[in-house]
Image (cartoon, grey):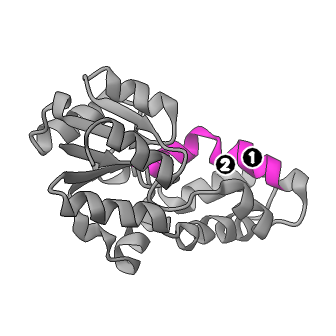
Amino acid sequence: MNIIFDLGGVVVRWEPEALLAQTFDDPAVCRVVHSEFIGHADWLELDRGTMPPAEAIMRAARRTGLSEPEVRRFLTSVPPALVPIAGTVELLYRLKAQGHSLYCLSNMHFASIEYLERSYAFWEVFSGKVISCRVRLCKPEAKIYAHLLETFQLEPAETVFVDDIEVNLAAARQFGIRTIRFESSAQCAGELRGLGCM
């Protein structure tokens, strides 16, 4: 079986609210940065690799009323906050040992993926990876799923996709890929067992 994993919120922690609270003391500022930066279209362009970080910082500073150094401090805190979820990493190695082919498909900025690749060894379990900033495509766009299937010659009926966001799973199902909505490592393992993958 081919099993595709999202990264943020599945393999590594992605908890923007906690990260905002660590960076800014004022809850009102946290809310503004969440809506005007993380939740803004510019964040997707960072993930897509089509907007330089300096431009995204300048534009976010203008929208939020914060200084550019304040916005930069938040953005540079993102990569080191993406720490592996131990239960998922253990699951990856178990699945690999059982003979499954593992892949990852993730929306991620250049700085984040480069930091993760430098810092952790779990990449060895993946037979291939598709990262949004490197292919200039983002989930849930159909083209990124088509790119993954074509690049690695995957048969959708023999493929399972694990993600924590329903819209990304719905897009995968359009290709005939089976899906699991990630809530925890244990729940994910249970659903993989239910599909006969373990």
Instruction: Give the SS element for disc 2.
Output: helix
Q: Quadrant of the N terminus?
A: top left
Going by the numbered disc 2, the residue's amino acid type is Phe
| Tag 1–tag 2 contact (CB < 8 Å) | yes
Q: Residue 37 carries which label?
A: 2
Is residue 39 inside the magenta stretch? yes
- Give the residue displayed 30% in from the left and 53% down from the top: 134
- Say whether residue 51 is visible: no
Identify the image quadrant of residue 176.
top left
- Give the residue displayed 17% in from the left and 34% down from the top: 158
Mark 2, Cα crowd under 10 Å, few <14 / some 14-19 / many 20+, is: many
Mark 1, Cα crowd under 10 Å, few <14 / some 14-19 / many 20+, is: some
Is residue 183 inside the magenta stretch? no
Compare residues 11 and 56 and report the one nearer the observer.
11
What secondary structure is the magenta-colored segment mainly? helix
Among all residues in the image, which is located at the extreme bottom?
119
Kindly identify which residue carries mark 1: 63
- Give the residue displayed 49% in from the left and 46% down from the top: 187
Q: What stretch is highlighted in magenta?
A: 30-48
Measured as percent of width and height from the top left, residue 91 is found at 36, 60
Gap in angstroms between the C-alphas marked 1 and 2: 8 Å
Going by the numbered disc 1, the residue's amino acid type is Arg
Measured as percent of width and height from the top left, residue 54 is found at 55, 62
* Viewer-side label of 1, 2: 2
